[in-house]
Image (spheres, rainbow, N blue to C red):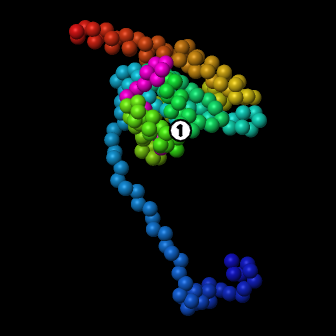
Amino acid sequence: MLRREGWPVNVKRVHRLYRAADLSVRKRRRKRIGPTERSMPLMARAVNQVWSMDFVHDGLSDGRRIRCLAIVDDFSKESVAIEVDTSLSGSRVARFLDQLAAQRGLPPVIRVDNGPEFTSLALDAWAYRNGVKLAFIQPGKPTQNAYIESFNGRFRDECLNDNWFSTLHEAKARIAAWRKDYNHSRPHWASPTFPDTFGKLMSLLEVSDTRGLL
């Protein structure tokens, strides 16, 4: 930098003047992250027991960005919902989950990453009020949220990459149509039927087993 300003100096001279003036640069100490609880990822054994949710980003033809909040049932692999908008804050996520609660109830556990919307005070307060545990995956380990990661990959390949959205309304309509097809028209690799049908079938079996024990 000194040479760039026109000063005829070399490394040794700069170092000698630096020491003579008793200059020093404060060294930054490496931030140490405290020990975190390491636990096995929760495994869903029934429908509506564990959901996973994450964001997928895309854009409109006019350059505006859109965000898609995707929610998947870990057991049935059903796409519970996909909320689409230009902005989805933590409080907005909480309001959308309230809508789902009125429609189908809530699971005891929702698996999420460490994004700002999921770690927000608004969503934390919502989870406390509704008795829902937010199961955070470890930072940098998306494989701990494998179900939603797999779904997001399919969602992007089969819907977002195949469509050119002109308006937010068009994006919502086409994404809703794709979600309906995903749930009702094609079987999942892990089950002999469609995600939506598989979830309903397992719910009926659980009710039947419960009655048999009475």
Query: Which one is nearer the viewer's eye here, 91 or 25?
Result: 91
Is 19 rendered above or below residue 173?
A: below
Q: Residue at x 53, y 38 (%)?
A: 90
Q: Position of residue 122 (x, y in %)?
A: 49, 39
Q: Position of residue 131 (x, y in %)?
A: 37, 31
- Number of dots carrying numbers: 1
- What quarter of the picture does the N terminus occupy? bottom right
Query: Which one is nearer the viewer's eye here, 19 or 130?
Result: 130
Q: Secondary structure at mark 1?
A: helix
- The segment highlighted magenta reads 101-114
- Asked if the stretch drawn in magenta spans residue 60, the answer is no
In the displayed structure image, the side of residue 203 where residue 89 appears, left or right: right
In the displayed structure image, the side of residue 80 where residue 108 appears, left or right: left
Q: Residue at x 56, y 19 (%)?
A: 182
Q: Position of residue 18 (x, y in %)?
A: 58, 86
Q: Residue reaching furthest left?
A: 214
Asked whether residue 46 is in view, the answer is: yes
Is 84 rendered above or below residue 186?
A: below
Task: Choose top left, top right, bottom left or bottom right for residue 180.
Answer: top right
- What quarter of the picture does the C terminus occupy? top left
Q: Residue at x 46, y 31 (%)?
A: 52
Q: Residue at x 49, y 73 (%)?
A: 27
Question: Which residue was labeled with disc 1?
Answer: 90
Task: Choose top left, top right, bottom left or bottom right for residue 153.
Answer: top right
Task: Choose top left, top right, bottom left or bottom right for residue 58.
Answer: top right
Asked whether residue 192 is in view, the answer is: no
Q: Position of residue 146 (x, y in %)?
A: 46, 34
In the displayed structure image, the side of residue 188 where residue 82 appears, left or right: right
Q: Amino acid at mark 1?
A: Gly
Give the crowd class for mark 1: few <14, some 14-19, many >=20 residues within 10 Å.
some
